Image (cartoon, helix red, strand yellow):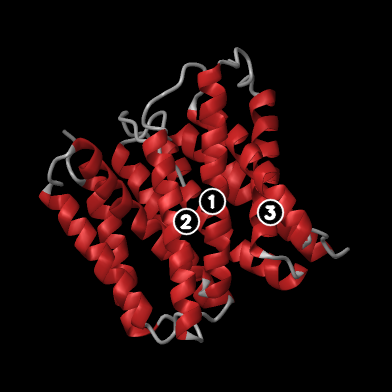
Amino acid sequence: MSAVVVSARPEARSAGMLLAAGVLWGTGGLAGSLLAARGGLHPLSIATYRLLLGGALTVLLLAATGGLRGLVRTSEAVRRILLAGALLAVFQASYFIGVILTSVSVATMVTIGSVPVFVAVATALTERRRPANSAIVSLLAALLGLVLLTWSPGGAGDRAQLLAGLVFALLAGGGFAALTLLTRHAVAGLDPLRTTAFGCLTGGLLLLPFALWLGMRLPVDLEVVTLALYLGAVPTALAYAAYFRGLRGAHPVLAALAALLEPLTAALLAAVLLDERLGATGWCGAALLVLALAVSYWRPQH
């Protein structure tokens, strides 16, 4: 997921990279859920593996492509990396806890669907002005979608567990919304991919003491090791690389479609591979969350 919005002429290759990034992001929750089940890992450990592996691989990508040249070490850049790392740690840890407590589809939809709500509320409060009508429609659709997901009989086995999972998914959405607001203002020498790479590493290091205490040992099993590497490489390093490359020549609407593909991909994969069922009420809630996200991203920018 990304907080970056740019305007550029659409090109077929850029569009393909953006859409591929959205699909790859959607596999992250499934990979983390399978890693927890196969490896017996705590959600914090899974988040730590994703951030550390994804950050390390992205740094290697930057090094191979010359992206580390001219890297600044100003106090402003250090503060940005530390804050981004802390927010990424909150986001990833809360997201995977939400996945374990609810399901891949519910946690992903709630996390992504709540981001526009948090951003709109925070923007209205800081700018002291009433949100636009489109933003209000987005907020109402997202809130109603969350209510319907809560009532969905297929969302989770236990209602208290479902509510706890929703709280963590909302916390994840709040963390990502804060990251979105933070990265609106550029820092000299820190492009989005650099911020992502070093932010992931920082977030992983912040979670590392807790993960070590909870247990990070991976079983000597090819499937488990492959899942861990996949989680760090594909829905993290590769997806972000494709997204940022695609942003160079694509229209903002395509960036929005990439974000929309994440919860849709997660829901479809969870239904096919994990036999997760939301039920009619849950799918209505999911549709409202997608509508909220679409309205939030596609409304005219002034």
Q: What crowding class fits label 1: few (fewer than 14 Cα within 10 Å), some (14-19), or many (20 or more)?
A: many
Q: Is residue 267 visible?
A: no
For the point 25% across and 38% down, the residue is 126
The earlier-in-sequence mark between 1 and 2 is 1
Q: Quadrant of residue 264?
A: bottom left
Q: Nearer the viewer, residue 218 or 166?
A: 166
Q: Earlier in the sequence, mark 2 or mark 3?
A: 2
Tell me whether circle 3 and circle 1 mark residues in contact (CB < 8 Å): no
Labels 2 and 3 touching (C-beta < 8 A): no
SS class, disc 2: helix
Check disc 3: other Cα within 10 Å, few if <14, some if 14-19, many if 20+.
many
Looking at the image, residue 65 sits to the left or right of residue 166; the answer is right
Q: Nearest the camera: 231 or 133?
A: 133
Give the residue at mark 3: 230
Q: Which residue is mark 1?
A: 90
**x, y percentage for residue 102?**
51, 75
Helix, strand or loop status at disc 3: helix
| First-in-chain label (3 vs 1) | 1
Q: Identify the residue at image location x=45%, y=58%.
A: 171
| Residue 224 picture location, percent across and down | 77, 63
The C terminus is located in which quarter? top left
Q: Which residue is mark 2?
A: 172
What amino acid is at disc 1? Val
- Which-is-in-front pick, marks 2 and 3? 2
Residue at x-position 41% and y-position 43%: 178
Give percent across and percent down for residue 2: 44, 42
Name the one closer to the observer, 254 or 277: 277
Task: Verify CB contact (< 8 Å) between mark 1 and mark 2.
Answer: yes
Which residue is at a point 55% across and 42% down the rendered structure image? 86
Query: Counting other residues with Cα less than 10 Å from the Cα at mark 2, is it few (<14), some (14-19), or many (20 or more)?
Result: many
Residue 278 picture location, percent across and down: 42, 80
Tell me the amino acid under the disc marked 2: Ala
